[in-house]
Image (spheres, coloured by chain):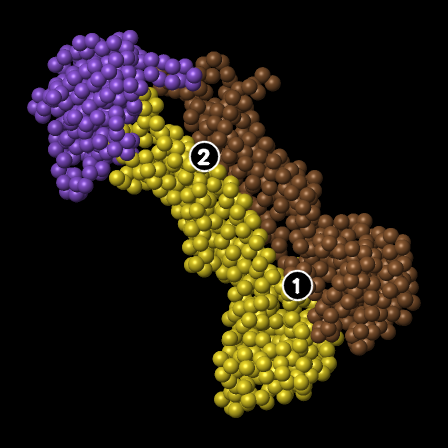
Chain colours: A purple, B brown, C yellow
Amino acid sequence: MALLEIRNLSKVYQRDSQAIPVFEAINLDIVAGEFLVLMGPSGSGKTTLLNLIAGLDRPTTGQISVSGEDVTEMTNRRLAAWRSRHVGFIFQLYNLLPVLTAYQNVELPLLLTPLSKRERREHVEAALEIVGLSDRGNHFPRQLSGGQEQRVAIARAVVSDPTLILADEPTGDLDAKSADEILTLMQRLNGEFQKTILLVTHDQRAAERGHAIMHLDKGVLTR
Amino acid sequence: MKYVKLVWANLTRSKRRTILTTLSVAAALFLFVSLRSVITTLEDAKQVGSESRMVTRNSISIVFPLPEAYYTWLSAVPGVTSVSWACWFGGIYQDPKNFFPQFAIKADSYLPMYPEMVIPEDQRGQFMAERTAALVGKGLMERFGWRLGQNIQLRSSIYVPEQTWPFTIRAVYTPTDPSFGDELMFIHYEYLYENSGRWATPGWYVLQLDDPARAASVATVIDEHYKNSGASTRTETERAFQTSFITMYGNVGFLLNAIGMAVFFAILLVAANTMMMAARERTSEVAVLKTLGFSDRLLVGLVLAEAAVITVTGGLIGVFGAKLIFEGTEFQGAGFLPGFEVKWGTAVIGLLIAVLLGVVSGLVPAWQAARLPVAHTLRRVA
Amino acid sequence: MKIPLIYNLRSLRQRPISTLTTALGMGLVVLVFIAMSALSRGFRAALTETGSGDNVIVLRTGADSELTSGLGRQTASTITSMPFVARGADGRPLASPEVYVLVSLQRLSSGEALVVARGINPEAFQVRKNVSIIAGRMIRPGTSEILIGKSIVDRFANTGIGQTISLANRDWTVVGHFAADGSSFESEIWGENEQFMPAFRGEVFQSLTFRLKDPAAFESVRQTLADDPRLPVDAHREYDFYANQSFQLTQIINIAAIFVAGIMAVGAIFGAINTMYAAVGARAPEIAVLLTLGFRPASVLFSFLFEALVIAFLGGLIGGLFSLPLNGIMTSTTNWQSMSEVAFAFRVTPDLLLRGVVFALVMGFIGGFFPARRAARQPVVEVARQI
């Protein structure tokens, strides 16, 4: 069984009285441990697809299952709880809460769990270690470079050991060197820690880091 | 002007913010105008009372009476054309909460001295003809829903408190000057005298002068004459007499002004904060406008105009809202503030304050807009 | 499921001007509220301090104030000798018959005031609560000597020790000042009954106040006096009598306080609403992150509501702090119920400070609710797409 199964997914946006179809009848399987890259022109619905998988949005038709659980059927409340345990999301911008330290930002998802303070500390320190920022825990986002901020975001994405990591243009706002570091890190997460990753990107070099590339264009998904 | 659309667009950018700030200013100005009107009403009350009438009271204090015998000598004082007297009845109508002043007067001499009380001729005749008649102000008739000819009962806390005093309303007066008060009641002194076991005596004398300029000398003559007698007197113009009552309130003016200041500053903070928040959201637009050629001076003007629209609109609502509400409900502070009104002078001051508020609250964001370094801001936009 | 409070506290620090001006605005509302309430309480305190629960004050039947009352010597002595009147250490009855008149005096500041002139016997100092001479000496019987209450001194002319005041065509020498625990007695002039009677209203007292031998027996004492055909009097508990005299003015001030503070509160709440909406708007991305991570909308709502309450709490503290200097400031007015001048002090009590804080929190809650709800209802997708 695939980790992620998408069947006949379609999404139509309602803007005022206009109906804007994004994509139709998408089918996709992602196996555990896969590092999949999704590319496509702007406005093709890549972010929308990511949001649907994460349970941040509801499809117009179709079904999404993660580890056998049908995400599309869940109530919002359950979705929130499910999301906290199963999905690690990395945005392009504004990932971190500026008033919290790196440590506190990474700790955020764990506050939704029954873990004790000591247990949380262990997880956070481990996550910061993986991304190589153990000594920056006390720093605020404004004291970190763009690349370092994204690394903290990645640490936060993995700290609760989620089933699936979804990344939406994580290197879009970074310079070449930082982008490179981020992508290497993601490869390591996938290779060394067996994390299943779905990466949305414009960048061809980023695309080469994954196992497979898919294209979403004019509502059609192709491998 | 051609920039009206721009200012309007900025104001309607967040309707919620604009409306709430406007209403805040309205609330503050409503309060300000109310407080100020209490002060002006009290000031006006000090002006009530003719300069050509004088009041002679017991020199110890108003609560001490004067002998009825003084009437004869007082009538003969040079410069005094007529003399009358009155005293405080201290009555309660049903419940102490229904307080209104009642005076027992020597009506035949008293009423002619008070042309401010306009009474229909036939009613005047009826009042004069009946011992237990009552002359009542228009405001009282409305307040209690009385009709002419109605019988009412009062209890006096001073005169024979064990028994009730019945009266019949025979006349209604309308004051020519609202500050005179339309919630007063007048009864016959003779009735009071007879029914109190002849115990009542005048509370004070009222004297009509032929020449107001002689007030001081007349006062001296009278007070000197009675200085060493059983009841020595203190004579002063009716206006001075009224004023002394108002001053008994103490330093109300100071308190109200202090509150007014607090209100002003509180609202200034709200308005200024709003303007700053709005400005913060628009720095990139200001940068663009500058590149288009809008001068600093123009931008400052736009910001101030925006602030002024909010505060002046709020000011208009608050000031005229107050005027409408108080005059619509004929508010008189339960009789303590006769002739209460929001004067035009107060309204104008209120609006000027609103304008001032607008300018001050817009100062910081206007200054920031003028000083904005364009390049730095545009880099962020792109 | 809680969003850390430190997030809110630090966010407030990030926008110090916004936070402070909103808090200050609320603080001013609280200040005005506390100030006016302190005025009302101070006035009430001055009057309730005046009466003791152990004393009975007797007035003529139907009289609602000492001013309009009259008791003959015979009546006074009859009641004084009754068994329910307590006796002092020397065996004499603790009963104080008193003359009570109002005299018109010019305030040094401006305007006139009606000041209470009370005739007393030496018993008054034992019967009336907490009165003591703080300067000079007691008046000597048979002389035109008077004592001046603490709050009259300095506010009226000729009230220093050794000076003379002219009342009712006689000159009276001030020989002492007295204090009475902040009660309305401090706004009075005291002289000897036997001297005041011929000067003012003749051979009649206005009131008789005595100590109950058995404080619990008031009802039966009242009944006894009411039933006695020789005695045209009403008995009142001294405490209740004076407390009632404060009723009207206290009510007026309280109503005015609610009116003023209420309207100001509306302005402050609107200000808070705007501030919080701005905060929610500026932090939309942060809210999106929180919702994405799985924090529930309810948690987001409470989080922002907490922020509004912190601002409000700050405002309450500021308002309370600024109101403290008012405590003890003296002012005076005419109590229309008794027509007499009463001096009293602003009274800022801990209970009032607490009310101020609660008032602020209520304002904060109302002001913060809708913006907080907006934050919670933020559609994550909209924002996520922007990100």
Going by the numbered disc 2, the residue's amino acid type is Asn
Q: Nearer the viewer, mark 1 or mark 2?
A: 1
Circle 1 sits in a helix, a strand or a loop, which is it? loop
Say if mark 1 contacts mark 2, CB within 8 Å.
no
Above or below: residue C182 compared with residue C227 = above
Q: Image check: C296 left or right of C201? A: left
Q: Which residue in the protein does label 2 denote?
A: C274
State the residue in front, B300 or A74.
A74
Q: Percent position (x, y) of residue C77? A: 63, 88
Residue under the image location 61 percent in, 36 percent down: B317
Above or below: residue A1 compared with residue C34 = above
Quadrant for residue C191, please give it: bottom right
Circle 2 marks a residue in which chain? C
Structural crowding at the residue carrying mark 1, measured as other residues with C-alpha within 10 Å and reported as few (<14), some (14–19) or many (≥20): few
Circle 1 marks a residue in which chain? B
Above or below: residue A154 compared with residue C196 = above
Residue under the image location 47 percent in, 16 percent down: B289
State the residue in front, A5 or B251.
A5
Q: Which residue in the protein does label 1 denote?
A: B95
Q: Image check: B249 left or right of B226? A: left
State the residue in front, C365 or B180.
C365
Quadrant for residue C195, please give it: bottom right
Residue under the image location 65 percent in, 71 percent down: C64
Q: Image check: C22 left or right of A107? A: right
Structural crowding at the residue carrying mark 2, measured as other residues with C-alpha within 10 Å and reported as few (<14), some (14–19) or many (≥20): many
Quadrant for residue A144, please give it: top left
Q: Image check: C316 left or right of C144? A: left
